[in-house]
Image (cartoon, rainbow, N blue to C red):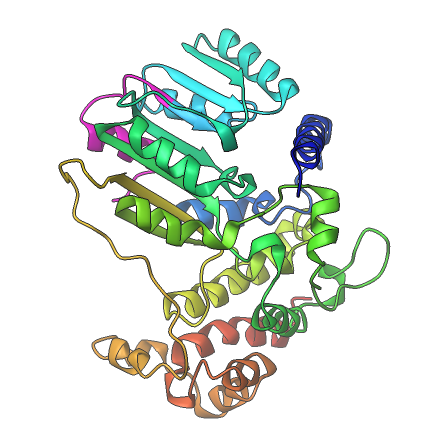
Amino acid sequence: MTTQLDYEASLRAESKKWGEHLKVEAQADSLGDNWLGHPLISQHYAERGLVDGLPWPQWVGKSLGEPAERSLDLGCGSGEKSFEVFRSGASRYVEGIDISTDRLREAEARSREQDIPGRFREADVNTIQLPENSYDLIFSWHSFHHFLELEHIMQQVHQALTSRGLFVLEEFVGPTQFQWTDLQIELVQAMLGFLPKSLRMYRAGWAKKYEGRSTPEEVQAVSPFESIRSGEIVALFKRYFHVVRVRQLGGTLQHLLYNGILHNFLRDKEQSEHYVKAIYEMEDALMNFRLIPSDFMLLIGQRRDAPQTEPAELVPEVREGPISHVSTELVGQKLAQLRMKEAELDGLLGSRAVRILKRYGKIKYKYLLPVGRSLGRFVGIRRSGNR
């Protein structure tokens, strides 16, 4: 994207890709390889995203005290999240911006069908100019990681919010252009080793052993703006906005692990349920103790120059090096409820996943009870013959 012509060609390609994706989404098995396509996983994701016990659209309405007069959805697609915001009582009038004419056409049709007041228009969010002090709510739902000019967009959002307004991102904030870390790749490979072959089968007929790392050029060839600066989103959000709520939604391991094989877990939900829970509990344990970051996050902010109606909330950061803070955080917990048989725990602590964590300097033996309990799910499932 070194020239304006290159940029415009990439923009057209991106618009075409997401317009054509409507056909894929219309198929019955359209979410078969999307990690959030499994009901248990999506339910757990939603639970992690609750704000004071509420989905964020409902929390926004409660926080504002009344519906926003106008809301703006950046990268609105077919308007799905805008309609949820309206139905939740968070906005009286919904607006959306996207580059895909096909998706905007569908958003307009759905808006008329559901009698939802609003307007959806075609525009490039990267170059958008927003009127000052105009929106009580601006949000982006799984679209912001496709935007290139993050500083410009955040400055425009900042000026367009009213003094009471909120900016909400529910977003992929993991490695830019899907350049997974070595730790992610190796942990996923270790977790795959716990799964029976029947759950690791690609549709093409061979078993998944690991999730690789595409080159940036390969990622861009599929989608020119895919996660183009995703790794910078959190830092820039903190720079431009007063952060009032943060939720770690996960996906750091699940996003990679389920790629290409989730259909197996959907085909026999009863058989795979224990594995699904074990996988997200393992990710939760690593994430909650700040051994790995969260690749998907919910961020809610206010203008920095506006009266602060909510206290600031810190964005969790991964601790570098051995994390002695975990032993402190364990104090006060009911350790008896976490303890396992000594021989079983010793076996878990010698597992490949734990060896990987030790090698990366992320963890020490005495801090492994929460991780060990999650690994125990895998061992217990395999021993019980649930294959």
In the rendered image of this protein, does residue 384 appear above or below residue 314? below
Q: In this view, does 67 lie to the left or right of 218?
A: left
User: Which segment did they paint magenta?
Assistant: 49-71
Taking the spot 22% from the left edge, 41% from the top edge, the residue there is 304
**Residue 240 visible from this viewpoint:** yes
Which of the pair 370/107 is nearer the observer?
107
Vertically, is 340 above or below 19? below
In depth, the one of 385 and 292 nearer the eye is 292
In the image, 147 versus 201, the foreground residue is: 147
Residue located at (53% from left, 39% from top): 147
* Residue 227 picture location, percent across and down: 58, 47
Position of the C terminus, as image quadrant, is bottom right
Query: What residue is rendered at 37% in x and 31% in y?
Result: 156
Question: Residue 165 at what x, y percent from top left?
Answer: 25, 30
- Residue 170, position as x, y percentages in the image: 43, 42
Residue 53 magenta-highlighted = yes
Spot occupied by residue 124 in the image (x, y as percentages of width and height):
54, 27
Foreground of the two, 136 or 4:
4
